[in-house]
Image (tube, grey):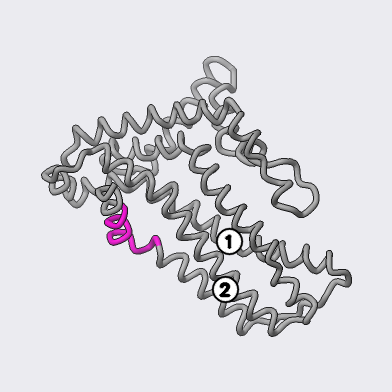
Amino acid sequence: MNTYVWLIRREFWENRAIWICPAVIGCALMLAALFGRVEVAGLGSPEQNRAMAGMALFAFGIIFFLVMTIYSTWYLLDCLNADRKDRSVLFWKSLPISDTAMVLAKLFTGLIAIPIVYFAAADLSALLMAFIISLRAHSSMGSALWQPDLWLQLQALWLYVIASTAIWYLPLAGWLVLISAWARRAVMLWSIMPPLAAVLAERLFLGSHVVENLLKNRLAGYLAVAFHNPGPISVWRLLDPIGFFSSPATWIGVLVGAALICGAVQLRLRSIEL
Protein backbone atom coordinates (compact mmCIF):
# COMPACT_ATOMS: atom_id res chain seq x y z
CA MET A 1 0.00 0.00 0.00
CA ASN A 2 2.85 2.41 0.83
CA THR A 3 4.27 1.78 -2.64
CA TYR A 4 1.06 2.94 -4.30
CA VAL A 5 0.87 6.00 -2.04
CA TRP A 6 4.39 7.07 -3.03
CA LEU A 7 3.72 6.38 -6.70
CA ILE A 8 0.64 8.60 -6.60
CA ARG A 9 2.61 11.30 -4.75
CA ARG A 10 5.18 11.09 -7.49
CA GLU A 11 2.49 11.84 -10.08
CA PHE A 12 1.52 14.97 -8.15
CA TRP A 13 5.16 16.06 -7.90
CA GLU A 14 5.80 15.58 -11.61
CA ASN A 15 2.43 16.92 -12.81
CA ARG A 16 1.88 20.17 -10.94
CA ALA A 17 -0.95 21.10 -13.29
CA ILE A 18 -3.08 18.61 -11.31
CA TRP A 19 -3.49 21.21 -8.57
CA ILE A 20 -2.45 24.41 -10.37
CA CYS A 21 -5.32 24.31 -12.91
CA PRO A 22 -8.15 24.03 -10.34
CA ALA A 23 -6.43 26.65 -8.17
CA VAL A 24 -6.37 29.07 -11.10
CA ILE A 25 -10.03 28.41 -11.90
CA GLY A 26 -11.01 28.92 -8.26
CA CYS A 27 -9.09 32.20 -8.04
CA ALA A 28 -10.69 33.45 -11.26
CA LEU A 29 -14.18 32.67 -9.97
CA MET A 30 -13.53 34.38 -6.65
CA LEU A 31 -12.18 37.47 -8.40
CA ALA A 32 -15.33 37.51 -10.51
CA ALA A 33 -17.45 37.27 -7.36
CA LEU A 34 -15.45 40.02 -5.64
CA PHE A 35 -15.26 42.57 -8.43
CA GLY A 36 -17.96 41.55 -10.91
CA ARG A 37 -21.46 42.95 -11.01
CA VAL A 38 -23.71 41.06 -8.62
CA GLU A 39 -27.37 41.86 -9.03
CA VAL A 40 -29.19 38.83 -7.66
CA ALA A 41 -32.60 39.59 -6.30
CA GLY A 42 -34.84 37.18 -4.46
CA LEU A 43 -37.30 35.41 -6.70
CA GLY A 44 -40.07 35.51 -4.14
CA SER A 45 -40.70 32.19 -2.41
CA PRO A 46 -38.00 30.39 -0.40
CA GLU A 47 -38.39 27.36 -2.69
CA GLN A 48 -37.53 29.44 -5.75
CA ASN A 49 -34.53 31.01 -4.02
CA ARG A 50 -33.35 27.59 -2.91
CA ALA A 51 -33.67 26.22 -6.45
CA MET A 52 -31.76 29.18 -7.87
CA ALA A 53 -29.00 28.77 -5.27
CA GLY A 54 -28.71 25.05 -6.04
CA MET A 55 -28.39 25.74 -9.75
CA ALA A 56 -25.69 28.35 -9.11
CA LEU A 57 -23.62 26.02 -6.94
CA PHE A 58 -24.08 23.19 -9.44
CA ALA A 59 -22.89 25.48 -12.25
CA PHE A 60 -19.66 26.16 -10.35
CA GLY A 61 -19.04 22.43 -10.19
CA ILE A 62 -19.75 21.97 -13.89
CA ILE A 63 -16.95 24.42 -14.76
CA PHE A 64 -14.45 22.37 -12.78
CA PHE A 65 -15.84 19.10 -14.17
CA LEU A 66 -15.35 20.17 -17.78
CA VAL A 67 -11.76 21.27 -17.24
CA MET A 68 -11.05 18.13 -15.20
CA THR A 69 -12.38 15.91 -18.00
CA ILE A 70 -10.04 17.50 -20.54
CA TYR A 71 -7.02 17.35 -18.26
CA SER A 72 -7.63 13.77 -17.07
CA THR A 73 -7.96 12.61 -20.67
CA TRP A 74 -4.68 14.22 -21.63
CA TYR A 75 -2.96 12.92 -18.48
CA LEU A 76 -3.95 9.30 -19.18
CA LEU A 77 -2.90 9.63 -22.80
CA ASP A 78 0.51 11.07 -21.95
CA CYS A 79 1.45 9.37 -18.66
CA LEU A 80 3.25 6.26 -19.96
CA ASN A 81 4.50 7.92 -23.13
CA ALA A 82 6.18 10.69 -21.11
CA ASP A 83 8.13 8.14 -19.07
CA ARG A 84 9.69 6.82 -22.28
CA LYS A 85 10.32 10.27 -23.70
CA ASP A 86 12.44 11.40 -20.75
CA ARG A 87 13.83 7.85 -20.27
CA SER A 88 12.68 7.79 -16.64
CA VAL A 89 11.19 4.38 -17.46
CA LEU A 90 14.74 2.99 -17.22
CA PHE A 91 15.11 4.36 -13.70
CA TRP A 92 11.77 2.96 -12.55
CA LYS A 93 12.52 -0.44 -14.07
CA SER A 94 15.70 -0.55 -11.98
CA LEU A 95 13.63 -0.29 -8.78
CA PRO A 96 11.72 -3.16 -7.13
CA ILE A 97 8.41 -1.74 -8.40
CA SER A 98 6.32 -3.76 -10.82
CA ASP A 99 5.05 -2.36 -14.08
CA THR A 100 1.56 -3.35 -12.97
CA ALA A 101 1.88 -1.09 -9.91
CA MET A 102 3.10 1.77 -12.11
CA VAL A 103 0.20 1.48 -14.55
CA LEU A 104 -2.41 1.09 -11.80
CA ALA A 105 -1.03 4.11 -9.91
CA LYS A 106 -1.29 6.26 -13.03
CA LEU A 107 -4.77 4.92 -13.74
CA PHE A 108 -5.89 5.69 -10.17
CA THR A 109 -4.44 9.19 -10.46
CA GLY A 110 -6.30 9.89 -13.70
CA LEU A 111 -9.64 8.38 -12.68
CA ILE A 112 -9.85 9.08 -8.94
CA ALA A 113 -7.13 11.38 -7.58
CA ILE A 114 -7.46 14.15 -10.17
CA PRO A 115 -11.30 14.29 -9.91
CA ILE A 116 -11.04 14.43 -6.10
CA VAL A 117 -8.65 17.40 -6.35
CA TYR A 118 -10.95 19.21 -8.77
CA PHE A 119 -14.11 18.59 -6.78
CA ALA A 120 -12.38 19.63 -3.55
CA ALA A 121 -11.37 22.85 -5.31
CA ALA A 122 -14.93 23.22 -6.58
CA ASP A 123 -16.29 22.85 -3.05
CA LEU A 124 -13.85 25.35 -1.57
CA SER A 125 -14.45 27.83 -4.39
CA ALA A 126 -18.23 27.46 -4.10
CA LEU A 127 -18.03 27.98 -0.34
CA LEU A 128 -15.98 31.17 -0.68
CA MET A 129 -18.11 32.45 -3.56
CA ALA A 130 -21.29 31.75 -1.57
CA PHE A 131 -19.88 33.81 1.29
CA ILE A 132 -18.95 36.69 -1.03
CA ILE A 133 -22.23 36.64 -2.94
CA SER A 134 -24.27 36.38 0.25
CA LEU A 135 -22.65 39.64 1.38
CA ARG A 136 -23.07 41.44 -1.92
CA ALA A 137 -26.42 40.07 -3.12
CA HIS A 138 -29.98 40.37 -1.89
CA SER A 139 -30.36 39.00 1.62
CA SER A 140 -33.00 36.40 0.76
CA MET A 141 -30.89 35.00 -2.06
CA GLY A 142 -27.75 35.09 0.04
CA SER A 143 -29.34 33.08 2.82
CA ALA A 144 -30.52 30.49 0.29
CA LEU A 145 -26.88 29.63 -0.43
CA TRP A 146 -26.39 28.46 3.16
CA GLN A 147 -28.57 25.37 3.27
CA PRO A 148 -26.93 22.34 4.97
CA ASP A 149 -29.05 19.87 3.03
CA LEU A 150 -28.12 21.56 -0.25
CA TRP A 151 -24.39 21.25 0.51
CA LEU A 152 -24.85 17.64 1.61
CA GLN A 153 -26.57 16.85 -1.68
CA LEU A 154 -23.69 18.41 -3.60
CA GLN A 155 -21.14 16.27 -1.73
CA ALA A 156 -23.18 13.15 -2.44
CA LEU A 157 -23.41 14.13 -6.10
CA TRP A 158 -19.64 14.71 -6.42
CA LEU A 159 -18.73 11.42 -4.75
CA TYR A 160 -21.23 9.51 -6.87
CA VAL A 161 -19.95 11.15 -10.06
CA ILE A 162 -16.33 10.33 -9.20
CA ALA A 163 -17.07 6.66 -8.50
CA SER A 164 -19.52 6.08 -11.35
CA THR A 165 -17.52 7.89 -14.05
CA ALA A 166 -14.36 5.97 -13.05
CA ILE A 167 -16.26 2.71 -13.61
CA TRP A 168 -18.22 3.74 -16.71
CA TYR A 169 -15.27 5.26 -18.54
CA LEU A 170 -12.80 2.52 -17.57
CA PRO A 171 -12.72 1.24 -21.19
CA LEU A 172 -11.80 4.74 -22.41
CA ALA A 173 -9.13 5.07 -19.72
CA GLY A 174 -7.78 1.63 -20.59
CA TRP A 175 -7.61 2.57 -24.27
CA LEU A 176 -5.77 5.81 -23.49
CA VAL A 177 -3.12 4.14 -21.32
CA LEU A 178 -2.75 1.37 -23.92
CA ILE A 179 -2.01 3.96 -26.61
CA SER A 180 0.26 5.83 -24.20
CA ALA A 181 2.25 2.64 -23.62
CA TRP A 182 2.45 1.75 -27.32
CA ALA A 183 2.67 4.90 -29.46
CA ARG A 184 6.09 6.44 -30.03
CA ARG A 185 4.70 9.85 -30.99
CA ALA A 186 1.43 11.60 -31.93
CA VAL A 187 -0.46 9.85 -29.12
CA MET A 188 -3.54 11.99 -29.63
CA LEU A 189 -3.75 11.02 -33.29
CA TRP A 190 -3.25 7.32 -32.57
CA SER A 191 -5.98 7.39 -29.92
CA ILE A 192 -8.49 8.76 -32.45
CA MET A 193 -7.54 7.09 -35.74
CA PRO A 194 -8.21 3.37 -34.98
CA PRO A 195 -11.80 3.89 -33.70
CA LEU A 196 -12.49 6.32 -36.53
CA ALA A 197 -11.06 3.90 -39.09
CA ALA A 198 -13.18 1.07 -37.67
CA VAL A 199 -16.34 3.18 -37.91
CA LEU A 200 -15.61 4.25 -41.50
CA ALA A 201 -14.60 0.74 -42.62
CA GLU A 202 -17.76 -0.82 -41.17
CA ARG A 203 -19.96 1.83 -42.77
CA LEU A 204 -18.18 1.51 -46.14
CA PHE A 205 -17.88 -2.27 -46.44
CA LEU A 206 -20.76 -3.58 -44.32
CA GLY A 207 -23.20 -0.68 -44.34
CA SER A 208 -23.81 -1.09 -40.59
CA HIS A 209 -23.20 1.14 -37.58
CA VAL A 210 -22.44 -1.30 -34.75
CA VAL A 211 -19.04 0.15 -33.80
CA GLU A 212 -20.34 3.71 -34.09
CA ASN A 213 -23.30 2.94 -31.84
CA LEU A 214 -21.08 1.22 -29.28
CA LEU A 215 -18.79 4.24 -29.13
CA LYS A 216 -21.70 6.66 -28.88
CA ASN A 217 -23.34 4.66 -26.10
CA ARG A 218 -20.12 4.53 -24.13
CA LEU A 219 -19.21 8.19 -24.57
CA ALA A 220 -22.68 9.70 -24.22
CA GLY A 221 -24.69 7.03 -22.41
CA TYR A 222 -23.44 7.71 -18.90
CA LEU A 223 -26.20 10.09 -17.83
CA ALA A 224 -28.98 7.76 -18.96
CA VAL A 225 -27.53 4.85 -16.96
CA ALA A 226 -26.34 6.65 -13.82
CA PHE A 227 -29.23 9.08 -13.23
CA HIS A 228 -33.00 9.13 -13.17
CA ASN A 229 -34.92 11.42 -15.49
CA PRO A 230 -34.80 15.03 -14.22
CA GLY A 231 -37.62 15.78 -11.83
CA PRO A 232 -37.82 17.86 -8.68
CA ILE A 233 -34.55 19.56 -7.76
CA SER A 234 -33.22 16.92 -5.38
CA VAL A 235 -30.04 14.94 -5.79
CA TRP A 236 -31.51 12.04 -3.84
CA ARG A 237 -34.17 11.57 -6.54
CA LEU A 238 -31.69 12.14 -9.35
CA LEU A 239 -29.08 9.50 -8.51
CA ASP A 240 -29.70 5.97 -9.72
CA PRO A 241 -26.93 3.75 -8.27
CA ILE A 242 -29.08 0.61 -8.46
CA GLY A 243 -29.76 1.12 -12.15
CA PHE A 244 -26.10 1.93 -12.79
CA PHE A 245 -24.60 -1.09 -11.02
CA SER A 246 -27.25 -3.47 -12.35
CA SER A 247 -26.74 -2.41 -15.96
CA PRO A 248 -24.96 -5.02 -18.13
CA ALA A 249 -23.29 -2.17 -20.03
CA THR A 250 -21.50 -1.13 -16.83
CA TRP A 251 -19.89 -4.51 -16.26
CA ILE A 252 -19.17 -5.19 -19.91
CA GLY A 253 -17.27 -1.92 -19.91
CA VAL A 254 -15.35 -2.99 -16.79
CA LEU A 255 -14.27 -6.24 -18.51
CA VAL A 256 -13.20 -4.42 -21.67
CA GLY A 257 -11.35 -1.82 -19.62
CA ALA A 258 -9.56 -4.52 -17.59
CA ALA A 259 -8.43 -6.24 -20.81
CA LEU A 260 -7.07 -2.97 -22.21
CA ILE A 261 -5.26 -2.21 -18.96
CA CYS A 262 -3.67 -5.67 -19.02
CA GLY A 263 -2.50 -4.90 -22.56
CA ALA A 264 -0.98 -1.63 -21.37
CA VAL A 265 0.88 -3.48 -18.59
CA GLN A 266 2.29 -5.98 -21.10
CA LEU A 267 3.45 -3.17 -23.37
CA ARG A 268 5.02 -1.42 -20.39
CA LEU A 269 6.93 -4.62 -19.57
CA ARG A 270 8.47 -4.61 -23.04
CA SER A 271 9.08 -0.88 -23.37
CA ILE A 272 12.34 0.84 -22.67
CA GLU A 273 12.45 4.26 -24.33
CA LEU A 274 11.44 6.11 -27.48
Q: Say if mark 1 contacts mark 2, CB within 8 Å.
A: yes
Q: Marks 1 and 2, how far apart in space?
A: 10 Å
Q: Residue furthest right?
A: 44
Q: Which span of residues is magenta-colored?
A: 8-18
**What residue do we see at 33% from left, 48% from top?**
78
Q: Which residue is mark 2?
A: 29
**Dot 1 or dot 2, earlier in sequence:** 2
Which quadrant holds the C terminus? top left
Q: Is residue 135 above or below residue 180?
A: below
The quadrant in which residue 49 appears is bottom right
The quadrant in which residue 184 appears is top left
Q: Position of residue 69 (x, y in %)?
A: 50, 51
**What residue do we see at 63% from left, 78% from top?**
131
Which residue type carries mark 2? Leu
Question: How many badges with numbers are in the image?
Answer: 2
SS at circle 1: helix
Identify the mark at residue 63; answer none if there is no mark: 1
**What residue do we see at 52% from left, 20% from top?**
202
SS at circle 2: helix
Q: Position of residue 268 (x, y in %)?
A: 24, 36
Q: Position of residue 228 (x, y in %)?
A: 72, 41
In terms of secondary structure, what is the magenta stretch mainly? helix
Which residue type carries mark 1? Ile
**What residue do we see at 59% from left, 17% from top?**
207
Q: From the viewer's side, name the closer residue of 49 and 21.
A: 49
Q: Residues within 10 Å of mark 1 (few under 14, many from 20)?
A: some
Q: Is residue 53 above or below residue 8?
A: below
Q: Does 207 sit left or right of 270 as displayed?
A: right
Q: Does 269 sit left or right of 223 as displayed?
A: left
